[in-house]
């Protein structure tokens, strides 16, 4: 298992057998006043990347460029929140599953850890960019796009007509 640590931030990228996951260790004060330090897991599968790229007109890059060019900070704040929550999940103990659900995302969104992360990302574009590169690494995007293009090519193949027996 390869781990890349950035000295400035407790953001770890775990790469094992082509699966990249961001694990962000965060210290926060819970609602009982208890200081906690927990790892939180973030990941997008190739399927999710394809859905993300195709759900936005022009793709993710064009969408973000438009928001920044138009200085539409309201849209940017909405997008950052959605991106974090869509990437959030819990890795199963045996490593077979990365569980995501609305319930898990909602519970995470109601923690001070999420609040701290969200505020960090909307005030420091570099930290958000580093996070995005972690959950959407170029190699993963390239593989998803290649997979999508191959499937499109298959869709363009005309099946041979079935001939009836003579």
Image (tube, rainbow, N blue to C red):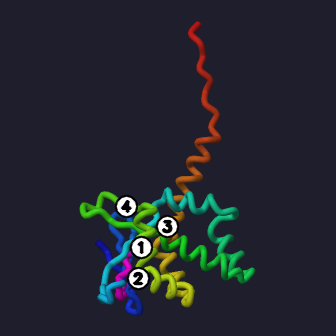
Q: Are marks 2 and 3 in contact (CB under 8 Å)?
A: no
Q: Earlier in the sequence, mark 2 or mark 1?
A: 1
Residue 87 picture location, percent across and down: 46, 68
Q: Which mark is residue 99?
A: 4
The answer to whether the residues at label 2 and label 1 have Cβ atoms under 8 Å apart is: yes
State the residue position of label 2: 113
How far is disc 4 from disc 1 in space, using C-alphas?
Answer: 13 Å
Q: Residue at the spot x=56%, y=47% of the render? A: 151
Q: Which residues are magenta?
A: 23-30
Looking at marks 3 and 1 on the same chain, the residue that comes earlier in the sequence is marked by 3
Q: Which mark is residue 86?
A: 3
User: Would you say the residues marked 3 and 1 are in contact, meaning their CB atoms lie under 8 Å apart?
Assistant: no
Q: Which mark is residue 108?
A: 1
**Whole-Å distance between the Cαs marked 3 and 1?**
11 Å
Q: Earlier in the sequence, mark 4 or mark 1?
A: 4
The residue at the far right in this view is 70
From mark 3 to mark 4, how far is it between C-alphas? 11 Å
Label 3 environment density (alpha carbons within 10 Å; few <14, some 14–19, many ≥20): some
Q: Position of residue 141 (x, y in %)?
A: 53, 65
> Is residue 28 within the magenta segment?
yes
What secondary structure prevails in the magenta region? Answer: strand
Q: In the rendered view, tell whether residue 125 sits above or below residue 46.
A: below
Taking the view exactly as shown, the residue that stands out farthest to the top is 166
The secondary structure type at the circle numbered 2 is: helix
Q: Is residue 10 left or right of residue 150?
A: left
């Amino acid at each position: 298992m390869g781990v890349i640590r950035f000295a400035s931030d407790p953001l770890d990228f775990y790469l094992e057998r082509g699966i990249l996951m961001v694990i962000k260790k965060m210290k926060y004060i819970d609602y009982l006043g208890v200081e906690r330090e927990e790892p939180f897991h973030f990941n997008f599968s190739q399927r999710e990347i394809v859905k993300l790229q195709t759900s936005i007109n022009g793709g993710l890059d064009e969408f973000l460029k438009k928001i920044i060019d138009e200085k539409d900070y309201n849209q940017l704040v909405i997008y950052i929140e959605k991106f974090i929550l869509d990437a959030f999940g819990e890795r199963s103990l045996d490593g077979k599953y990365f569980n995501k659900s609305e319930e898990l995302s909602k519970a995470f969104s109601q923690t001070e850890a999420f609040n701290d992360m969200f505020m960090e990302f909307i005030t420091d574009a570099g930290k958000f960019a580093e996070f995005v590169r972690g959950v959407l690494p170029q190699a993963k995007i390239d593989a998803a796009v290649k997979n999508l293009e191959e499937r499109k090519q298959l869709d363009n193949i005309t099946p041979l007509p079935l001939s009836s027996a003579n």
